[in-house]
Image (cartoon, helix red, strand yellow):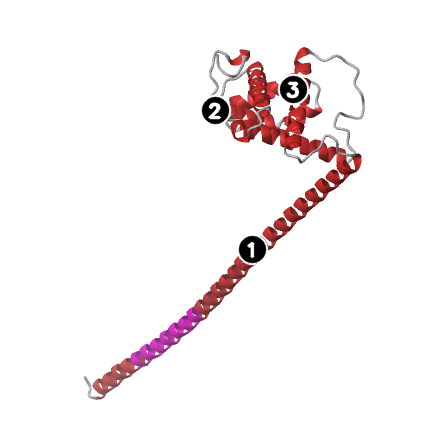
Amino acid sequence: MSEGGGGDRFSQWSIEETRDLLTIRGELDSTFMETKRNKPLWEVISAMMKERGYNRSAEQCKNKWKNILTRYKGYETIEQEGMRHEFPFYNELQAIFTNRMQRLLWMEAEGINPSGSKKREMKFSSEEEDENEDRLVEKASYISKKKQKGIESSTSSIGTLDNRNNDMINNLKEVLDEYMKRQMDVEMQWMKRYEAKEEERRMKEMEWRKTMEALGKERIMLDERWRQREEERKMREEARNEKHDGLIRELLEKLRSQGL
């Protein structure tokens, strides 16, 4: 049996395929947190896996996720930091849960209720209950690790939480300011390159126009010279013909005067 659980026992999951599953699951994590019905989301994940060349059903993807999650929670209880990284997908799962907690803290700081404005009084299917339980365990696991590192304290006061939220808001503002600054720098560099290329294009166009104007003037001068030479040739030809006619007339007059 492969590590993917009951739904994928007939086919071994490769490390690359598992990482693709975690990537897709991480991209949809915010949607999983916002919806009560997760079955359609696993169908979406199955379709996205097929787009990447893997033939996995929604049930197989879900079972694989739960299997990896169980192993991750087992490594989370290990105190030695180095042993945790023996689990090949530890970093991927840690990134998913870190992003989830940052999103939850940001929503709390903004006064947004992550669970929704209306309380739903309904019973979930076993599939949905498993998923919600996984969410609570994942969240608790993440908070437990933060406690071990001394970043969060179980006995922190409301004022400390407010300070942490304020720090996170300030950090987000700094990140956004830095991002906007970089965007402006990129746009300025792009504008400079665009203006330089535009100026180069204008210079080349002006040079081309000057060259064409010079060629046009030169052609006009050549045409004028040709007309002048043609006019001179005609004048010489007319003069020669007139001289020739004059000689013939003189010859005829001379012959006539001699009685020939």
Q: Which x, y percent locates residue 116?
A: 77, 25
Q: Earlier in the sequence, mark 3 or mark 2?
A: 2
In the image, residue 13 sits, relative to residue 194, either above or below, namely above
Q: CA distance from mark 1 to mark 3?
A: 52 Å
Residue placed most toward the observer, 129 or 190:
129
In the image: residue 202, left or right of residue 39: left
Q: What residue is drawn where x is 48% and y is 24%?
A: 15
Q: Residue flagged by tag 1: what amino acid is it?
A: Tyr
Q: What residue is drawn where x is 71% and y is 33%?
A: 153
Residues drawn in magenta: 218-241
User: Which quarter of the image is occupied by the C terminus?
Assistant: bottom left
In the image: residue 122, left or right of residue 219: right
In the image, residue 63 sits, relative to residue 107, either above or below, namely above
Residue 234 location, quadrant: bottom left
Q: Nearer the viewer, mark 3 or mark 2?
A: 3
- Count of labels in the image: 3
Q: Which x, y percent locates residue 122?
A: 77, 14
Task: Tell me, yes or no, whether the two marked residues, 1 and 3, touch with CB atoms within 8 Å.
Answer: no
Q: Which x, y percent locates residue 112?
A: 77, 32
Q: Which mark is residue 134?
A: 3
In the image: residue 85, left or right of residue 147: left
- Mark 2, secondary structure of its residue: helix
The residue wearing badge 1 is 194
The residue wearing badge 2 is 15
Q: For mark 3, does the 10 Å Cα neighbourhood hold few (<14), some (14 to 19), or many (20 or more) residues?
A: some
Q: Residue flagged by tag 2: what amino acid is it?
A: Ile
Q: CA distance from mark 3 to mark 2?
A: 22 Å
